[in-house]
Image: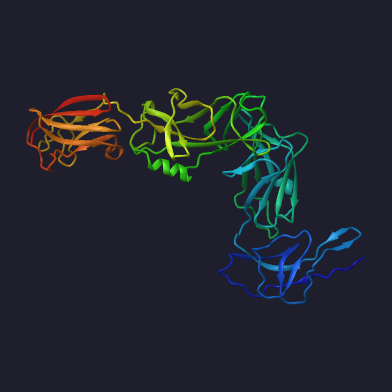
Amino acid sequence: MNLFKLLAVFVLSFSFEQCLWAGWTRLNSVYGSYGSAPVTVSNMVTISSYSVAQTIGSEAVGSYAFNYSGGELTTGYLSQFYSTRLFPEILSFTSDKGMVSGGVLWGTGESSAQKVFFSNEMSTSSLSQQVRVTQVSDHLAAAVNSTWTVNVAYLPLESAVSIATGSAVWAKGGLFAINFSSALKDLNGLPVASGATVYFSVAMDKDQNNVSKLAGDDSVRINLSSETFGSDFFVVLSTSQDSQAISAANGKNLYGFLPLKTLTAASYDVSGSTIQPLIPWTLRFDYKDADNNGIVDGTNPKVKVRNLSVWWLNDDVKTWVRQNGAVIDRTARTVSLNTGHFSTYALMSSPDEDVSSVHAYPVPFRPNASGAARSGTWADGIRFTSPPVRGKIKIYTISGRLVKEIDIAPATIINGEIPWDVKNSDGELVASGVYIWEVTSGSNRKTGKLVIIK
């Protein structure tokens, strides 16, 4: 039997500014340099985050692997190493098929193993008991919540956990969650902080109807019939608005509205090549209107449900383009659009030109009278409620002389109202009397009467 000499290397000094924690581990292989001589070993791993400050002993890291009757062995050594992470964390996630976007692995194969990489070398003790795989939803995005039997293996040279199916293949079009319990620890006994979960979806069957949605988010989904693609496929979805194209398009919005939601959809065949649908597909955005008052919850300026529309991002000119044919379902609180192209879409409000609900208060305006809630105050002035998102308000004397003109824009609408400080265009308080107001937006017009008593 061959004897192999291992060098015990001790790090005697290191800077606390360079690390959060240090521990002892055995490095299975090394690539880099030792002293003045280059060191290369088979099955090598590049270790750029480890460094040795000072060593004791003789060199024993071999430049080759030793062969023996049981196989091949690479020499190693013990070292104290720097770590920028106290607890082990998931670094990345991959498979032999599909791609990772937004933290989700999309379009893995029905027989593929999923590989999860950790920041630290993990303990293999009871590993299979610390990994749980559940199917979150099926190919129609219907909740499943079933636990799957899987084969779990640890790959020490990669600090990775491999998860493969047991007796059955992954369900096509299914969304799965891999959960690592906090009982999973690294070699130093430190647990995965608060557990960790990653999601993966399986490529969809072209011969069945499918629904694609975000992991853990039912608010955005797309419906795909069995004729949508000519081969098995997967769809990558993102609701991020961080792209340069979206930022540029938002800056060109004349009415100040930003997307309430966005969805970027891209489709691929199982080899990862970009494809487009053969027939139209259905995009669906959800919105909230808890009070059923026709106003989208949490919007300021207030967005009326009836003005919701779907817009397409023209990447060439970085501009939002309104799409015709969007359907608003007030019961389901959804906005749907049939479209033929996978791209970036947004749920936004179309410019509201309705003036039918505009009215002014208080009338009469008597700021020096008692009962401010009824008569008004100089601080609050006169207010015009339910204004359109764009247009003008003009105030005239009874003889028709223009007193004040107010531009209506999202920036001038405060809590759903347009304030007037009861001053003319020269900044002077107007005299007591009767005035006529007119609001216009597009081809719409409405008038009313004001009475001011100072």
Q: Is residue 203 above or below residue 183?
A: above
Q: Is residue 69 above or below residue 194?
A: below
Left or right: 291 with respect to 94?
left
User: Considering depth in this image, is 74 or 251 the residue closer to the camera?
Assistant: 251
Left or right: 156 with respect to 249?
right
Image point 66% across, 68% down: which residue?
51
Q: Is residue 33 above or below residue 70?
A: below
Residue 448, quarter of picture: top left
x%, y% of residue 216? 56, 37
Q: How many marks?
A: 0
User: Considering depth in this image, is 167 or 444 the residue closer to the camera?
Assistant: 444
x%, y% of residue 287? 44, 31
User: Considering depth in this image, is 245 or 258 the residue closer to the camera?
Assistant: 245
Q: Is residue 123 above or below residue 325?
A: below
Is residue 291 visible in the rendered image? The answer is no
- Scheme of image coloration: rainbow
Is residue 379 visible in the rendered image? The answer is yes
Q: Quadrant of the C terminus?
A: top left
Residue 49, quarter of picture: bottom right
x%, y% of residue 148? 71, 36
x%, y% of residue 307? 37, 28
Image point 60% across, 60% down: which residue?
86
User: Considering depth in this image, is 374 or 75 the residue closer to the camera?
Assistant: 75
Q: Quadrant of the N terminus?
A: bottom right
Left or right: 206 with respect to 404?
right
Image point 61% across, 65% down: which residue?
21
